[in-house]
Image (cartoon, rainbow, N blue to C red):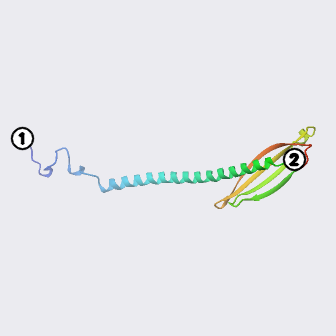
């Protein structure tokens, strides 16, 4: 059996040709551009997720503050309709409204229904955000103003 000597393929196996030794510059550039697009999309997803987490943290903080304040209000005697505003040191503003509801349904009962509406506002960037909580409390109709 005789072997052929191909001068251009010395030291290489006959299956490999001159054009298949590695990646061309064009292939490398295409691969890098595809990877750059994938990394960019992943980073955009992360930044969107971080913004959502920060916003939900603000809403959670406002909800906890408003819930705490509305519980304090419910512990007080609610003898008359009233409204007031409060501001906290960390930038929250609370507007509170206490009013009697269902007057015609409770006029023959020994209790009155008082609705408490608390609106909490805060600034997020350039936008003002707000959250509204409502609850009700039955108040003894015969109780003096200082008692529950």
Rendered image: mark on residue 147: 2
Taking the image as shown, residue 90 lies to the left or right of residue 146, namely: left
- Give the alpha-carbon distance from disc 1 to disc 2, as whole Å: 116 Å
Circles 1 and 2, Cβ within 8 Å, touching? The answer is no
- Res. 25 image quadrant: bottom left
Give the SS element for disc 1: loop
Q: How far across and how far down the image is residue 16, in percent? A: 20, 46
Q: Is residue 66 left or right of residue 39?
A: right
Judged from the image, the secondary structure of the residue bearing numbered disc 2 is: loop
Residue 32 vs 104, above or below: the answer is below
Which quadrant holds the C terminus?
top right
Q: Residue at x 8, y 42 (%)?
A: 3
> Residue drawn at (58%, 51%), measured in percent from left and top?
53
Which one is in front, 23 or 142?
Answer: 142
Q: Dot 2: few (<14), some (14–19), or many (≥20) neighbours within 10 Å?
A: few
Q: Is 29 left or right of 58, judged from the image as shown? A: left
Q: Closer to the camera, 65 or 95?
A: 65
Q: Is residue 144 left or right of residue 131?
A: right
In front: mark 1 or mark 2?
A: 2
Residue 101 rendering spot, x and y as whole percentages = 86, 44
Q: Residue at x 23, y 51 (%)?
A: 19
Residue 97 coordinates in the image, percent (x, y): 81, 52
Disc nearer the start of the sequence (1/2): 1
- The crowd level at tag 1 (other Cα within 10 Å; few <14, some 14-19, many 20+) is few
In this figure, which residue is indicated by the disc labeled 1?
2
Single out the residue that lies furthest toward the left: 1
Residue 103, x across and y down, in percent: 90, 43
Compared to residue 143, the image places residue 32 above or below, namely below
Who is closer to the viewer here, 143 or 107?
143
109 in relation to 78, above or below: above
């Amino acid at each position: 059996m005789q072997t052929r000597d191909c001068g251009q393929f010395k030291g290489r196996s006959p299956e490999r040709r001159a054009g298949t030794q590695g990646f061309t510059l064009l292939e490398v550039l295409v691969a890098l551009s595809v990877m750059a697009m994938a990394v960019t999309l992943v980073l955009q997803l992360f930044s969107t997720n971080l913004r959502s987490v920060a916003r939900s943290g603000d809403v959670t903080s406002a909800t906890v503050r408003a819930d705490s304040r509305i519980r304090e209000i419910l512990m007080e005697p609610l003898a008359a309709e009233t409204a007031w505003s409060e501001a906290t040191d960390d930038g929250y503003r609370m507007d509170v409204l206490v009013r009697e509801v269902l007057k015609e349904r409770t006029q023959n009962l020994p209790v009155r229904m008082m609705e408490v509406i608390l609106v909490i506002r805060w600034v997020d960037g350039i936008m003002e955000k707000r959250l509204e909580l409502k609850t009700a409390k039955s108040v003894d109709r015969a109780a003096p103003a200082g008692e529950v």
